[in-house]
Image (tube, grey):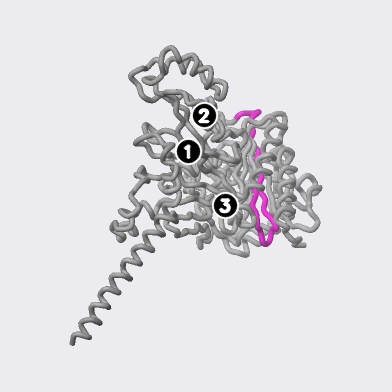
Amino acid sequence: MEESNSLFRIRIISFFILGFFLVLVISLYFIQIVNGDDYSIKADKQYLRPNENVFDRGSIFFQDKNGINVSAATLKLGFILAINPKLIDPSKEQEVYEKLSKLVEIDKGDYFKKVVKKTDPYEEIGQHLTPEIAQKITELKLIGVNVYKERWRFYPGDNLASNVIGFIGFQGDDLAGRYGIENYYENILSRKDKNVYVNFFAEIFSDVSATLGDDNQKREGNIVTTIEPMVEGFFEKKLEEINEKWNSRKTLGVIMNPKNGEIYAMGIYPNFNLNDFSNEKDVSIFSNPIVENVFEMGSIMKPLTMASGLDAGVVTVDTEYDDKGFLVLNGAKISNYDGKGRGKVNMQEVLNQSLNTGASFVVSKLGNKKFAEYMKNFGLGEETGIDLPNESVGIIDNLNSPRDLEYATASFGQGIAISPITTVRALSALSNGGLLVMPHIVKKIEYKNGLTKTVRGETEKRVIKKETSDEITRMLVEVVDSALLGGTVKLERYSIAAKTGTAQIPDSENGGYYKDRYLHSFFGYFPAYDPKFIIFLMTIEPKEIGFASHTLTQPFIDTVKFLINYYEIPPDR
């Protein structure tokens, strides 16, 4: 009996030892892995200002073609220079300034305004000092002068993807994400204020179940984007070249995987330096017009119209109509871009020559109601779901009009206004077999507790049949091979599907459209029958140039060639 009791006691003791060991292991995991950064700060506690936490925030990464993370937004470590006016002898104020100003650029007026506050124990006179400068200041041993460790947000790419990344700034008294990913994923990137100097043993013996179930721990993490930094850099340079060459008001573009919605590049020119954003005078430069603004897109909408007609079976590539160069609907005249008629032409020529009358003909065969259903199914009047803030919904009220005119003009991209990202999403369905995808900027979230969430953009929402996707793709390849700049940009070994668009810009003050202001757009995808990329370009109000084929074709082809070489895309024909 006594032997049995001893055995029982041994088992009880072993159970408690095992339990303690498990608690210890779990706690060490959270201390070393989850909260490792916090405790590294603890080692530098002697540098910190009393009763203040060092700034902390999750990181944002680009990801290159090999799956390697490249820093897009991180924390930089440095020092603050501060004075304690109470401790600085008035007779030494000038001497202190002279010694410090040899090491740090200090505003003289600001310094003397602060040093005379003799009841104030703390005034900052310099920030973002390097460790070397901080050490030299410490060696001066100036009474009332101190350096304190600090961390701040730093963007290694400066301007790279600035409108996508966004930045942090004050919202009232709180420092939080403003614009871009910094704003959209604020709940992931932000770190709630907490005391990072928790006693080691208190951490071990605290309520482990509460720690494991902490929602804040689960939510905090780092962001890995779909942006490929080399592609983004090339693309932004190309957008700048377009803007400078044609003296445009703004130029922008997107490169996306049309099958899963991953965005490899999203650029806007002019953009801004994320590390120096406070010097920008016009805050509108911080917004992202690809997501937040809507435009009348013009003729790049014609492939959507044509695909709708093909899908419904009301036209085929060989269907002909009599093009007189214009038509009159509800008392208004609709004309081709040159006002000329071509006689009998088929649907291929409607795309080749970008005929407004041909797009209107397709709508007449579809019927207004059916045409509107297709356009809405392409997502023109809804959000895409992209993970960036302030997404705009398209203005497509004309698709509810009782008149024929509004449907006819919508068929060639006038009278309805949609965002560029909505346009890219809709056009991707032409290339990928007829499915809508969800465009997204973030590939995965790496949580502080070690878990990872992968973001996927595929969808099963079908808007056209696969056969229709194949046929409209064949027609758009023919546009490039034979019609785009006379077929001179055709790549013999690669199939490319593309279409240009030129739209008049609405006159918001007087109604109608400006006679001399245009929006040029261009989209294309390749390899056409198994696309890896869809490219969208747009330049607003280019000067002294009529058509998008002249402003955007060559930049598009340059981008195609870069992607072929960079990703080593094999020929498909």
The answer to which quarter of the image holds residue 357 is top right
Instruction: Say whether disc 2 or disc 3 marks the residue closer to the N-terminus.
Output: 2
Tell me if residue 47 comes above or below residue 371 in the rendering.
above
Residue 295 shown left or right of residue 568 in the figure: left
Q: Position of residue 76 (x, y in %)?
A: 52, 39
Whole-Å distance between the Cαs marked 1 and 3? 27 Å
Please name the predominant secondary structure of the magenta segment in the image. strand
Q: Amino acid at mark 2?
A: Glu
Residue hosting label 2? 139
Q: Nearer the viewer, mark 1 or mark 3?
A: 1
SS state under label 1? strand
32 and 161: which one is in front? 32
Classify 10 Å Cα crowding around label 2: few (below 14), some (14-19), many (20 and above). Answer: few
Classify 10 Å Cα crowding around label 3: few (below 14), some (14-19), many (20 and above). Answer: many
Task: Give the quadrant of the N terminus.
Answer: bottom left
Q: Is residue 516 magenta?
A: yes
Q: Taking the image as drawn, is residue 558 in sight?
A: yes
Tell me if residue 416 comes above or below residue 30 in the rendering.
above
Q: Is residue 236 magenta?
A: no
404 and 187: which one is in front? 187
